[in-house]
């Protein structure tokens, strides 16, 4: 049985409100339009388990937090960033381990392909190579930065609202 969550964009209503301006912007009107994220159904597929840590939030029995899902076992704000926006400057919300609160994070690199050889047959052509992708991200509040492996199930294309960057900090480094 398929399970659903309320749509995060329209909070389950199936509608979004947009404002249009006519007569040189003098008359503003609000319209309800069908939510494009859930196609007006108000529902989205149940959260997908993080495939990097298999929904554990931690790497294979260790105490190392999985950066892909930020230890949640499911997608967080990072997983909502469409793949086409995974490039430097794109922002997203995530709980920062150092700040201990949800802060605006920023993508710092383009997608990097990683080839990891996992077996060493004599013939190079027989060796198994694991292909993964990663980007570097950073907390804009404390500067903590690290690499995140991409889960192929996340980063669906769609409308994406970037959180605004906080005002730059006062003088100093
Ligand atoms: Zn919706
Ligand atoms: Zn994970
Ligand atoms: Zn931080």
Image: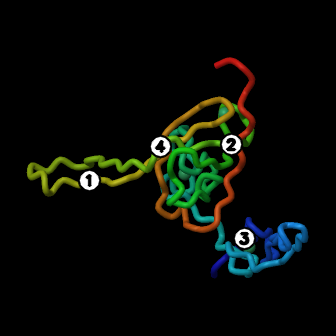
Cα gap from disc 1 to disc 3, whole angstroms? 37 Å
Q: Nearer the viewer, mark 1 or mark 4?
A: 4
Q: Nearer the viewer, mark 1 or mark 2?
A: 2
Marks 1/4 in contact by CB < 8 Å: the verdict is: no
Q: Nearer the viewer, residue 15 or 27?
A: 27
Q: Does the residue tagged 1 have its C-beta within 8 Å of any atom of ligand 2?
A: no
- Name the residue rendered at 73%, 76% in the picture: 35
Q: Residue beneath label 3, please?
A: 5
The answer to whether residue 60 is visible is no
Q: Residue beneath label 4, please?
A: 109
Q: Residue beneath label 1, please?
A: 129
- Dot 1 or dot 4: first in sequence order is 4
- Name the residue rendered at 65%, 61% in the picture: 160
The answer to whether residue 160 is visible is yes
Q: Nearer the viewer, mark 3 or mark 2?
A: 2
- Dot 3 or dot 2: first in sequence order is 3
Residue placed furthest toward the top: 172
For residue 104, the mark is 2
For residue 72, the mark is none
> Taking 106 as reference, is 42 left or right?
right
């Amino acid at each position: 049985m398929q399970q659903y969550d309320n749509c995060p964009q329209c909070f389950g209503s199936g509608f979004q409100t947009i404002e249009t301006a006519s007569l040189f912007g003098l008359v503003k009107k609000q319209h309800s339009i069908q939510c494009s994220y859930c196609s007006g159904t108000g529902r989205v597929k149940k959260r997908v388990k993080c495939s990097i840590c298999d929904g554990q939030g931690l790497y294979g029995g260790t105490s190392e937090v999985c950066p892909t899902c930020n230890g949640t076992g499911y997608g967080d704000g990072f997983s909502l960033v469409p793949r086409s926006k995974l490039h430097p400057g794109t922002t997203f919300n995530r709980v920062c381990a150092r700040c201990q609160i949800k802060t605006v994070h920023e993508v710092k690199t383009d997608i990097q392909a990683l080839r990891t050889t996992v077996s060493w047959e004599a013939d190079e052509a027989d060796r198994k190579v694991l292909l993964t992708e990663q980007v570097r991200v950073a907390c804009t509040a404390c500067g903590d930065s690290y690499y995140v492996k991409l889960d192929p199930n996340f980063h669906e294309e769609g409308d994406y609202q970037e959180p605004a960057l906080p005002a730059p900090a006062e003088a100093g480094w």
